[in-house]
Image (tube, grey):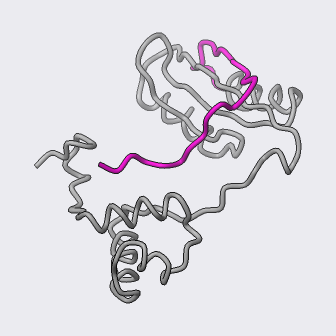
Amino acid sequence: MISPLFGKGEYDVKLDRIDKNILRQLQRNADISNLSLAETVGLSPAACFKRVRRLKAQGVIKSLVAIVDQKILGPCLHMLVEVKMERDKPQLHANFLRRVQRTIEVKECFKVTGDGDFVLIIDVPDMEHYEALCEDIFYADENVKNFRTMISMNKVKYSTEVQIP
């Protein structure tokens, strides 16, 4: 059966109403105690703990993280970078993606349709840092044809929540 939410059979994990409610609650506050979570979703603490553990084992919950407020730590420029490759060959793309994966400033990378091949979301403290990053990622890769950088003036919305039907 193909999952209507994701369109691929590999995501066919059966989630009932309570599982979905647990996921919604944890997305809002992963720091909630098991006791409070159990009360909110209408389960005993033991049953709730087992469900959360099962959701983790199934890979539905990938990780629980702390979202840090970057503004508290210092200045940060948010860049959106569209990258066009010279040649559309899987091995050349893989080389580029390995470099991207190793770069902590790259927060997200999307393979896209249209004129570009990839869109990257990059956070850096200043332009000098971004210039060095461009040397390491874009200019050092002979298959990068060109890239276009857009600097965010204001992060209007940011969310890590996944829609749960």
- Relative to residue 106, is residue 59 drawn left or right? left
Instruction: Return the residue found at the far left.
Output: 1
- Relative to residue 77, is residue 4 drawn left or right? left
- In front: 5, or 22? 22
Q: Quadrant of residue 81?
A: top right
Residue 70 percent across, percent down from the top left: 78, 47
Which span of residues is magenta-colored? 141-165
- Relative to residue 48, is residue 106 drawn left or right? right
Q: For the stretch drawn in magenta, what is the main secondary structure?
A: loop
Q: Quadrant of residue 114?
A: top left
- Residue 25 vs 159, above or below: the answer is below
Question: How many numbered markers are drawn?
Answer: 0
Residue 18 percent across, percent down from the top left: 29, 68
Instruction: Return the residue found at the far top.
Output: 115
Residue 12 percent across, percent down from the top left: 21, 55
Q: Quadrant of residue 4?
A: top left
| Residue occupying the point 53% across, 48% down | 160
| 161 part of magenta stretch | yes
| 68 part of magenta stretch | no
| Residue occupying the point 75% across, 50% down | 69
